[in-house]
Image: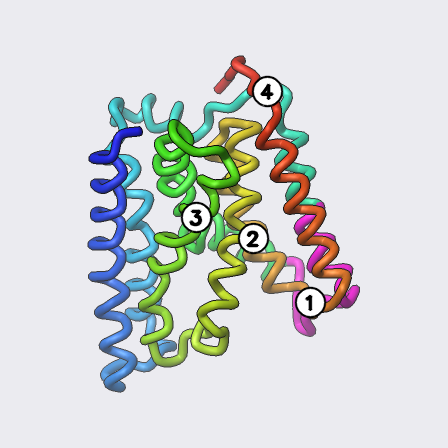
């Protein structure tokens, strides 16, 4: 485990993100700019690139070919694992009420999915799963690694709770930490079984969309769904890894 690489990743990620998100929080909290101002969204987008930029700067091969390989490499025949976790995650939220948020349209969902994948969560996976997870897994199991990543990943979002108008302020931070943990163990299992950063990017972006469009409720169905997810992640984390990879 390369401790220096881990420290460089975390420092670079936090510095880039917290500069832009800190400015965002300052401007809204002191009523200099309204949350709806386009500048606030631009600051959010720039800050969200912290893990992405940090990951790319730590690649040995920073050429376009090297970056492409880093993102799109995957193990043969493992798409089914990505699909399984995405379907189970989606059904867990949808089946808790069997309702979609009123006003949801196909066009808006597609546009939001693209946004979540590119700058609304998916892009983060180049860092958390692409750089941090492989380093930690040199010393810890897949599940323990996901638990460890939950801490810096959740704390990285703290500026949201100081940004006036941000929807995160309506969510207790500890509940958010649990959500980060739940998503993290799934993304970690996907990375473990597929060795694909891109599948993690897709899952993170699409899971954000699922949580947005499903009018879910915290009930026994949701709990059972998460228990199934937890059991699945522990199971696949113990699977014998495949070695074949393709681009």
| Residue occupying the far bottom of the picture | 31
Q: Is residue 188 left or right of residue 160?
A: right
For marks 2 and 1, the one nearer the N-term is 2
**Is 191 inside the magenta-drawn segment?**
no
Which label was assigned to residue 118? 3
- Percent position of residue 47, x then y: 29, 57
Q: Quadrant of residue 44?
A: bottom left
- Percent position of residue 196, x then y: 50, 30
Q: How packed is label 4: few (under 14 Cα within 10 Å), some, or many (20 or more)? A: few
Find numbered disc 2 in the image and state the secondary structure of the residue it sits on. helix
Find numbered disc 1 in the image and state the secondary structure of the residue it sits on. loop
Indicate which label's residue lies in the foreground, 3 or 2: 2
Q: CA distance from mark 1 to mark 4?
A: 35 Å
Q: CA distance from mark 4 to mark 3?
A: 32 Å
Q: How packed is label 3: few (under 14 Cα within 10 Å), some, or many (20 or more)? A: some
For marks 3 and 1, the one nearer the N-term is 3
Indicate which label's residue lies in the foreground, 3 or 1: 1
- Percent position of residue 46, x then y: 29, 56
Q: How packed is label 1: few (under 14 Cα within 10 Å), some, or many (20 or more)? A: many
Indicate which label's residue lies in the foreground, 4 or 3: 4
- Percent position of residue 93, x then y: 69, 59
**Is 89 inside the magenta-drawn segment?**
yes
> Which residue has dot 4 on it?
240
For marks 4 and 3, the one nearer the N-term is 3
Q: CA distance from mark 3 to mark 1?
A: 25 Å
- Residue at (43%, 48%) from the top-left corner? 118
């Amino acid at each position: 485990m390369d401790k220096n690489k881990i420290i460089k990743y975390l420092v670079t990620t936090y510095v880039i993100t917290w500069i832009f998100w800190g400015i965002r929080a300052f401007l809204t909290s002191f009523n200099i700019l309204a949350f709806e101002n386009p500048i606030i969204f631009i600051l959010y987008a720039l800050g969200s690139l912290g893990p992405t930029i940090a990951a790319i700067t730590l690649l040995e091969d920073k050429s376009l070919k090297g970056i492409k390989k880093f993102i799109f490499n995957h193990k043969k025949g493992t798409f089914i694992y990505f699909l399984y976790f995405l379907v189970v995650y989606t059904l867990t939220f949808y089946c808790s009420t069997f309702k979609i948020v009123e006003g949801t349209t196909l066009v808006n969902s597609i546009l939001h999915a693209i946004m979540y994948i590119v700058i609304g969560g998916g892009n983060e996976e180049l860092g958390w799963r692409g750089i941090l997870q492989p380093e930690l897994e040199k010393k810890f199991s897949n599940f323990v690694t996901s638990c460890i990543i939950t801490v810096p990943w959740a704390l990285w979002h703290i500026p949201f709770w100081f940004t006036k108008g941000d929807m995160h302020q309506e969510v207790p931070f500890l509940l958010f930490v649990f959500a980060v943990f739940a998503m993290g163990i799934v993304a970690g299992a996907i990375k473990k079984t597929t060795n694909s950063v891109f599948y993690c990017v897709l899952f993170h972006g699409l899971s954000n969309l699922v949580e947005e469009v499903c009018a879910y409720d915290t009930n026994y169905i949701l709990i059972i769904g998460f228990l199934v997810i937890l059991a699945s992640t522990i199971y696949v984390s113990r699977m014998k890894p495949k070695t074949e990879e393709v681009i």
